[in-house]
Image: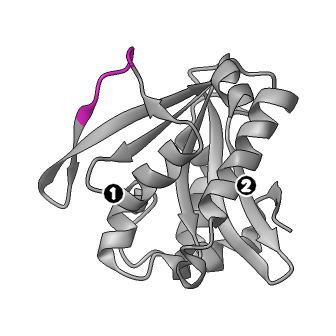
Amino acid sequence: MLRLRPFKPCDAQCVAQWCKDKDVYNKWGGMLIGEFPLSADDINKVYFEKNGHCEEPDNFYPMVAFDESGVVGHFIMRYIHGDNRVLRFGWVIVDNTKRGKRIGQNMLSLGLKYAFEILGVAEVTIGVFENNIPARKCYTSIGFHESPNIPAHMSEVDGEQWNTLELIITKEEFEKE
């Protein structure tokens, strides 16, 4: 049974190991945390000393998904510029040895349930690189769709321009799923 809990410093080693190559690191957004290869210390420094780069205090909520085998996935939640009606998911990653088992979908579905039922947000957004097909499929399979109000934009990744799509799901859409 998959469950969620807050991220602890000891979880950083798992996340660092899942960023096993430069492609995974880039598509995960690791460059926002540190240089490749990432270390557990890099992740913990950004998460616990720099509040996930969030300016507002109490606005960064890293989570892990775990089952009977241990930690199997990770993502973060944060409010957009302090607006408690809109939550943003990010830094989504799953244990690479467990891919293809719907862990990403189940983890984010639990995250959406928490966001809508516990936090009471109206919508959740997530960004995804257009070239990250598995992540896009994961997100759209649980109801995310391209946002009509937030345009796609380009991001520089290792000297290349990557298109970043902005996806959204509302509480009403989630309740229909």
| Residue drawn where x is 69% and y is 19% of the image | 172
Instruction: Inspect the magenta stretch and tell me whether residue 165 lies in it.
Output: no
Instruction: Inspect the magenta stretch and tell me whether residue 149 lies in it.
Output: yes
Which of 50 and 153 lies nearest the eye of the viewer?
A: 153
Residue 135 shown left or right of residue 53 in the figure = left
For the record, the magenta segment spans 148-153
Residue 38 shown left or right of residue 55 in the figure = left
The quadrant in which the C terminus is found is top right
Mark 1, secondary structure of its residue: loop
Which of 74 and 13 lies nearest the eye of the viewer?
A: 74
Q: Quadrant of residue 166?
A: top left
Residue 132: which disc? Answer: 1
Depicted 177 relative to depicted 48: above or below: above
Q: Is residue 77 visible?
A: yes
Look at mark 2 in the image and give the residue it sits on.
63
Residue 93 shown left or right of residue 65 in the figure = left
Residue 14 shown left or right of residue 22 in the figure = right
Image coords of residue 165 (percent x, y): 33, 37
Depicted 102 relative to depicted 49: above or below: below
Residue 160: which disc? Answer: none
Q: CA distance from mark 1 to mark 2?
A: 22 Å
